[in-house]
Amino acid sequence: MNRNPFTTNPLRRRSVLAAAGTMAAAPLALAGCGGSEETGDPNKLTFLNQSRGQEAVLTALAAQYSEEQGVEITVDSPGPADYLPKLQANAQSGKMPDVYSSFNATDMASFYRAGWAKDLTEELDAGWSTDFSPAVIELSTFEEGNNLDVAPGIYTVHWETQTYGFLINPALAGFTAADAPATTGAFIDALVNAGGGNFAVAASLTPQLVQAAASNWLTDDQIAATFNGEDPWEQDAWAGAFQFLVDLKDAGVIANGALLGGQGDNPEVETAFFTQSTAAIFDASPGVSVGFKTNPEFEDYFSIGILAADDGAQPPRSPGVPGKGAVINPKSAAADNALAFVKWLTAPEQQTAFATDARILPANPEILASDAVPAQLTGFAAGVETIQLMSATFTTDVKTAIVAESERLVLGESTVDEALANIQAAQDRTS
């Protein structure tokens, strides 16, 4: 079994500087410039942004930095559904942005392998790491021999810690944060009592859902061993994780009796929640920032962490994801200015602005423990202390298989044993 890949030195914490005030989304004084890749000007940057929830604050911070430093910054936000296709088109044309949003490791690995990401290890070891928690640094590090074939290094930095859990509308779910169920059985019973048909999870998030559920029986190393093809998917722990989906189906609490799939499925699930037509959804902490942007008037909701299995042998733990952050294009004419801008974005003042003005769970541990964290993020924040740290993730084929098998399970077209056999076959093709 691979050891934990994360070799960065222990971090030194420093006190949080004064919080940046609420950011006005000031427009950037730009003339349609395309950044250094098109202009060759090191003082013109483009940041290709994936996140809807951080767009307004990121744009305002970029305007502030432009005014203070004289570096012209364009924030290009095509939206989450169009982000990866646009990034792939840019890579194929050789006109990559100077800075671009980090995304999940499986989808980003090809860009890292192609040399479109600067290794930031030396910069972090030289003192920059003090702006982040050790867990975020660990989750961002590729070890020698990782299962995505990325060269060892750290290619992303993050101003967000992302955990998974459940967003709850108490008016529809029938329970409050004070009496929220802690186990899968109690959760299902509560939703049944509230009328059923009131829970949603996007098909694209089912890999994270089953990974979280499996933590009730497996350690982080055992989960990683499955991802690496060393341990089988066809074991009781993974059967128990997928059984949670079956139990939700059998209880009649899944909205419309099916998982929403296709491109943009999770934004649609989030829209249903924030327009108050769904009582509960499985989501990641960025869902709070999305809700704040799309429906700021709706604030009477809360988050809870991963549910315990009634017969679990381990404490339930959220999968670990570094969250919103940035990758620097080392081939950019503006690579040095891009690095300086990203260092500024991740400093405590700017992390505080992201937390207070966009409801983003910060990566700096002292800000995370401060009153800058909005009340709606409390359940997600609680999951940071026990977040899963591991040396591997899903291969693309396995992730695709989990999504497909989860959809079939909920439609009653497959059994758990059949699902695990098909996922194991996908693992065998890629191990």
Image (spheres, rainbow, N blue to C red):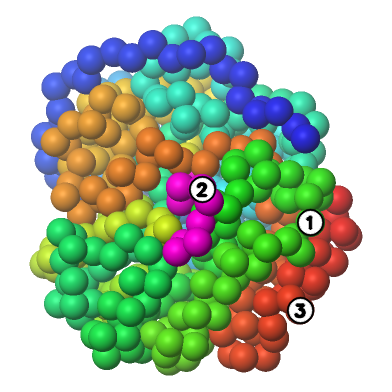
Where does label 1 land, which residue?
232
Q: Which residues are magenta?
A: 309-321
The Cα atoms of the two marked residues, 3 and 2, are separated by: 26 Å
> Left or right: 89 with respect to 340?
right
SS class, disc 3: helix
Gap between marks 2 and 1 measured at Cα: 19 Å
For the residues labelled 3 and 1, the Cα–Cα distance comes to: 14 Å
- Answer yes or no: is residue 47 visible: no
Main secondary structure found in the magenta portion: loop
Which quadrant, please, contains the N terminus? top right
Residue 169 percent across, percent down from the top left = 21, 71
Q: Classify residue 274 by image quadrant.
A: bottom left
Rendered residue at 62%/19% (across/down): 7
Whether residue 419 appears in this view of the structure is yes
Mark 3 or 2, nearer chain start: 2
Q: In the image, what residue occupies the spot 26% across and 86% down?
A: 193
Residue identifier under label 2: 314
Q: Amino acid at mark 2?
A: Gln
